[in-house]
Structure formats: C-alpha cells, structure tokens
Image (spheres, rainbow, N blue to C red):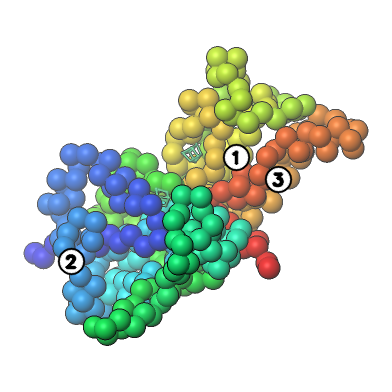
C-alpha cells in the first residue's frame, strides 16, 4: 500500500520548528517507515515546481511553519493549501505570529530603512535598497516583495489544525504524528499537540494568594534567592502561565524562568495580552495610585511581555500608524 505523503515547509521563521522535528530522535526512523516525505526544502532538494506539478490534495499532511511576511510566503501558503488534504499551522509563528510578528510594532518601510541604511553594522554608502524588480543586462531580477505587516497562516488560508509552541516540544510533535498516522485527529479547527488548560495547571510550584509590591526583570534576580517551590509570580517574576495554553509541561517555571507564553493563549482566551495585563493589575498590592503607577512601570515593555508570541493574531494585530 502507498505510504501517506508528508510535507514540511518553512516560511517566515527561524527554522527552529523544523529542527524541533528532529527532537523526536530515533522515532524519526518510524516516521520514515510510515510516510513518504515529498517536500521539505530544509532536508531535500525539492523545488516549488515539484509541488506545482502535484495533483490537488495529493499531499496527505503538510506541516507549515512560519509567518506570512512576503509574497513568496503567501504563494506557498496558497499552493500548499491547494495540494494538501490536511494543513497544519505548525508552531507559534504559523499559528499566532510569534517573534517575527513583533515586527507589527513597526512598519515595513521603517524595517527596510533600518536594516539597509541606519543599522550601525551596515556599510551602504550608495544607499542601495532592494527592490522587488531590478533590471540588469541579462534581464529582470525579482525578489519577493515584503508585505506591510506580518500575518499568520490562518489569516491567509483555511487551516485544519493549529499546533502551538516556539517550538512545539518533542513529545507533542510525536503525539501529533501518531494521531496523523492512526487517523485519530480531532475535529477540524482544533488545537493539536496541547494539554488541557493552562501552564499554571501543569506547573508544580505552590500557588497561594498573589499580592505583589515589586516586579523584577529576570536577569536582575539571583535565582539562588528565589524560593524553588513557590509560584514565581508571587515572588515578583512576571510569568504568563495563567493565560498560556498548556502543552510544554511547564518547562520554564521548572528552571526559575517565568513562562513567556510561547504556547499562545489558552483555549477560550480571545486576547492573551489583555488577559495577562488584567491578571497582573489584579495582584498589585497597593491602593495608592502613585505607588500603583510605580509598580506598573516596573513591567518594562508590556507589549513585548504580554504579546510576545501572538501580536498578529491578537485583537491589536499591529500598530496603527
Ligand atoms: S515558532 Fe519559534 S522555533 Fe518555530 S519557527 Fe517560529 S520562532 Fe522558530
Ligand atoms: S510560576 Fe507561573 S506557571 Fe507556575 S503557578 Fe506561578 S504563575 Fe503559574
Ligand atoms: S513555560 Fe511558557 S514559554 Fe516556557 S516552553 Fe512552556 S509555554 Fe513556552
């Protein structure tokens, strides 16, 4: 019997999700036995024309990681949607926007200006700026045009499943592969590779009443001074666990780091940043407006703290100019 056809593609991303796929270690041999990998530019010399030549829905499952930052990303999202029976937004970038999505705090033109002209490490005396089309003697050269802002995969095509995590942890990747191979995938539109509830529910630290007089940036705290058993938030370390989807096994709080929210909003939360800002405001231990303001100002970079992994898919979406 023919093996199911499998594809993995990397759009606007760091590539960590594809590398995370290898974290399943020797189980990769089981995957190799069970599926026919037909497209994966990271591992194989396959071309876009190879995908274009396939029949519609010929690929059984495609894991698509990365944001939609430029025309090439959008072209591949549309193409792989057309050619795949099941399309999974694989990892935080594709699913919620992740770190590349923080570019939505600025604008394409500002990014290009900084990267090609103003950055201290750039030498560009002729002020050359890449253009989507450039005429040369041999003809016309083209590069994909960058969009004004970043979008997630579900914002441009219909996706069957979203798998959060930056990157998803190996156990969850393996669980999803097993579900794919056994045909035991849940209802279309579901999150996959997750556990129930929030990171707080997976975290082994003791939770008590949260009343906080001071927030600390993690690098300014000596981990030896932290109580290893007690909730980090109660010790003044910002932790996004209360609003973050469970799935990683609460990895970060286990090593004295606040959860940064890479598994995205827990099911049922519409706007993660709004929810977290509300949660943090509610634990401030003061009634004095001046003191409250002082404590709030200790949360440096609130957008980068509460929307770090999900700005494009949040209600804010991007900065309005
Ligand atoms: S989700 Fe994280 S690991 Fe995966 S591609 Fe995006 S930035 Fe990289
Ligand atoms: S340390 Fe973070 S994840 Fe753990 S219980 Fe406290 S807020 Fe929740
Ligand atoms: S604890 Fe939070 S930031 Fe750390 S891996 Fe889990 S979801 Fe991601």
Residue 240: which numbered mark, if any?
1
* 263 sits to left or right of 275: left
Task: Count residues near mark 3 (Cα–Cα under 10 Å), then give few for <14, some for 14-19, many for 20+.
Answer: some
Spatial CA span between label 2 and label 3? 45 Å
Image position of 199 with respect to 136: above or below: above
Residue located beneath label 3 in the image: 277
Residue 8 location in percent, x, y?
Answer: 28, 60
The furthest residue to the left: 1
Q: Are marks 1 and 3 in contact (CB under 8 Å)?
A: no
User: Closer to the camera, 160 or 127?
Assistant: 127
Residue 26 position, x and y percent, is 18, 39
Question: How far separated are the C-alphas under marks 2 and 1?
Answer: 40 Å
Note whether residue 82 is visible.
Answer: no
Dividing the picture into quadrants, the one containing residue 242 is: top right
Q: Measured along the vertical axis of the image, is residue 258 above or below residue 40?
A: above
Place residue 108 in its image quadrant.
Answer: bottom right
Q: Is residue 216 above or below residue 72?
A: above
Counting residues from the N terminus, which is met first, the one under dot 2 or under dot 1?
2
Tag in front: 2 or 1: 2
Crowd around label 2: few <14 · some 14–19 · many ≥20 (10 Å): few
Provide residue 98's location: percent of width, then percent of height: 49, 53
Q: Is mark 1 within 8 Å of ligand 3?
A: yes
* Label 1 residue SS: loop
């Amino acid at each position: 019997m023919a093996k199911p056809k499998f594809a993995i593609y990397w759009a606007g991303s760091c590539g960590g999700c594809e590398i995370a796929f290898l974290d399943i270690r020797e189980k990769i041999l089981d995957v190799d036995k069970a599926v026919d990998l037909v497209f994966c530019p990271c591992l194989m010399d396959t071309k876009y024309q190879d995908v274009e030549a396939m029949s519609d829905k010929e690929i059984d499952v495609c894991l698509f990681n990365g944001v939609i930052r430029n025309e090439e990303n959008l072209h591949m999202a549309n193409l792989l949607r057309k050619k795949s029976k099941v399309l999974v937004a694989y990892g935080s970038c594709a699913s919620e926007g992740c770190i590349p999505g923080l570019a939505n705090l600025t604008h394409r033109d500002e990014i290009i200006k900084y990267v090609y002209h103003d950055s201290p490490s750039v030498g560009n005396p002729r002020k050359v700026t890449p253009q989507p089309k450039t005429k040369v003697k041999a003809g016309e050269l083209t590069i994909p045009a960058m969009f004004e802002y970043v979008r997630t995969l579900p914002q441009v095509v219909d996706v069957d499943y979203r798998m959060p995590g930056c990157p998803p942890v190996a156990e969850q990747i393996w669980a999803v592969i097993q579900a794919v191979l056994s045909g035991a995938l849940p209802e279309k539109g579901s999150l996959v590779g997750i556990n129930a509830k929030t990171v707080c529910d997976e975290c082994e630290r003791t939770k008590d009443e949260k009343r906080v007089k001071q927030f600390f940036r993690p690098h300014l705290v000596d981990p030896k001074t932290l109580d290893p058993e007690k909730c980090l938030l109660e010790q003044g370390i910002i932790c996004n666990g209360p609003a973050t989807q469970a799935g990683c096994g609460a990895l970060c709080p286990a090593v004295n780091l606040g959860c940064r929210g890479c598994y995205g909003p827990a099911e049922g939360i519409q706007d993660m940043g709004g929810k977290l800002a509300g949660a943090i405001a509610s634990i401030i231990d003061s009634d004095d407006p001046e003191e409250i303001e002082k404590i709030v100002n200790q949360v440096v970079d609130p957008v980068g703290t509460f929307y770090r992994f999900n700005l494009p898919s949040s209600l804010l979406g991007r900065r309005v100019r």
